[in-house]
Image: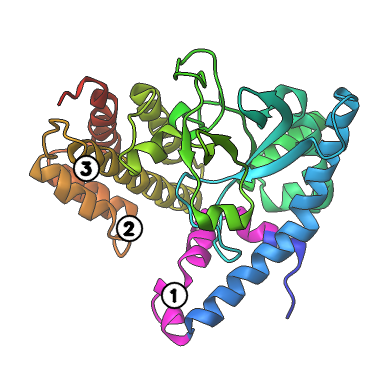
Amino acid sequence: EPLTVEDIMEMKSDPASMRTLKNLREVDALGSQLTQQEAEGIQREFNNVMDEYIHQPSYRTVEDHLHNRYPGVDPEGIRVRTVRTPGTEPTDFNINTDNDVIAERLVRGPNGAEWVEIPKTEWEDTYYKALAENSGFSVDEAGRRFPQTDWANMDEAAQVRQWAKHHEEAAMDQFDLSAGRDFSDQRTWRIPDGDLPGRPMIEATPEEIARGVDTVMIDGKPMRPSTGYELVQRQQGNLLDSEQLSLMESHKVDEYWNAGSTPAEVMRNQTEAMEQLRKTASVAQTVESSYRNMGYRVEQMPENMQEAIKVINNNSLSPAARAARLQELGYETPGDFLNKVTSRIGAIRTAQR
């Protein structure tokens, strides 16, 4: 039976369902019944329906809106797109559990044309309204699906913004609290970086060039915008702002762990908080191992922290069971563990060779 927009939006509002879809082959019982090709086919169909009927129509509305704001820009010089965590494999079946959206325009840079972000204040209201129109929003439908939200006391702009939030949709730019500087490939005057102020560049791979990524030629090499985190992953550079990166990760976990007004909502949100905590710990591990491989003196995580990460990664345990195990390991709450692991990300700025 074909997927409908309603099916898509029901799933998008449930982080646990989206995680299941993302890791379909790993789900007990169900995963063993599916071949890799069958699982990817289900994921691909989900992405295709969402892209065709929800995202792309909404993106085009924003692009039209921005062309009116920037009438001198080339017809192909404005684009709206989804941004993913640096290093995410770019396949048509890879499930994005949330959708962070940016708008960009083409400008002349030091080494040729480059895409730069348009501040979200110029277009986010347009996006949220278009998304609502393309995803079946009505006050009655919103009230049925999210009765805990006081829809009647919101104006239309607040309603469509809240609808987007319930479905993990967010307009984004590099200054958003959820967008760490080291996860952004945008230029900023605040951080000097040789001849390309504030914009890390990395040599594009043949696969990226074949896929059509944006490049400029520098010293005879095809270079593309990078992120500080990706440079660290490749052991080709350092983080630009480790403290801000640690704050970004803290924000994501806190937002989920403390949310929910019913037992079902608390369970769902705490499950997602644990997933965000897992990702935070993974970032810390990647940063520390990469710095060590580049010759920096970075102490290994203490044994109880390494064990805590194994607990957090154990999805067979409920969030409450994992929190209890963290207590046994010396972490009073998941937030206590979060503070300690993110402090290691922030402290990397002091690492020396």
Magenta residue check for 23:
yes
Residue 109 pos. (x, y %): 65, 24
Residue 273 pos. (x, y %): 40, 45
Residue 128 pos. (x, y %): 76, 38
**Can see residue 132?**
no
Residue 289 — which label?
3
> Which SS does the magenta portion mostly show?
helix
Q: Nearer the viewer, residue 204 or 5?
A: 204
Q: Residue lying furthest front in this view?
A: 220
Q: Is residue 202 above or below residue 16?
A: above
Residue 25 — which label?
1
Separation (CA) of disc 2 from disc 1: 20 Å
Task: Left or right? Give the position of 233 relative to 210.
Answer: left
The amino acid marked with disc number 2 is Ser
Separation (CA) of disc 1 from disc 3: 29 Å
Dot 2, how many residues are within 10 Å of its Cα: few (below 14), some (14-19), or many (20+)? some
